[in-house]
Image (cartoon, rainbow, N blue to C red):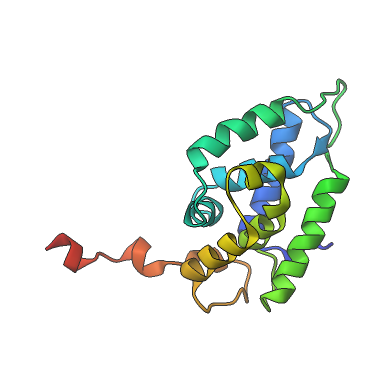
Amino acid sequence: MKSDRFTEKAQEALQEAAELARSLGQQAVEPEHLLLALIRQPEGVGRTLLEGAGVSVQTLEPVLVSTVERFPKVSGGGQPYISPALDKALEQAEQEAGRLKDEYISTEHLILALAANKLLKDAGASHDALLLALRQIRGSQRVTDQNPEAKYQALEKYGRDLTKLA
């Protein structure tokens, strides 16, 4: 899978996941590394999407950290590689992008692909709830460039609700 098919935020999340694995002395980058990177991503959609689906990210994050820290460690280092489980999730993300008729694989596609992860299921995230939350976040917009996340909820980010302020 080519990295130019991923949006900028999705590429950043994958790099952060690999860096997290490397910093912990782990050789394989697992789906949990990616999920942790997605919810920690500043200005990312991952955290908002999960919260919109009813997931308590404050509860999920420590569980993810604990899980990631228990993965096998190696000495001697080397570059981390994508585990078979993460590779399968990335293929699933590509299929999610195709179903939504998006041109690029974005962070929300990664989250949708990770919906089958046991930790997300235990946290209460379902694929349908994530899709519903995604519709609320991005409306009818499609991913047609490598930086679509900057366009989501633009009014909420850059505008002020004068009715609320009154």
67 or 107: nearer the viewer: 67
Quadrant position of the N terminus in the picture:
bottom right
Residue 62: x, y in percent?
A: 57, 31
Left or right position of 70 against 156: right
Residue 15: x, y in percent?
A: 70, 46
Residue 30: x, y in percent?
A: 77, 41
Q: How many marks?
A: 0
Residue 77 position (above or below residue 136): above
Quadrant position of the C terminus in the picture:
bottom left
Left or right position of 132 against 81: left
Q: Residue furthest top?
A: 75
Residue at x 68%, y 57% (from the top left corner): 110
Left or right position of 89 against 101: right
| Res. 77 in view | yes
130 or 9: nearer the viewer: 130
Figure quadrant of residue 158: bottom left
Residue at x 85%, y 43% (from the top left corner): 83
Residue 45 position (above or below residue 60): below
| Res. 151 in view | no
Residue 6: x, y in percent?
A: 71, 63
Residue at x 84%, y 33% (from the top left corner): 27
Residue at x 61%, y 73% (from the top left corner): 143
Q: Residue furthest left?
A: 166
Residue 25 position (above or below residue 98): above
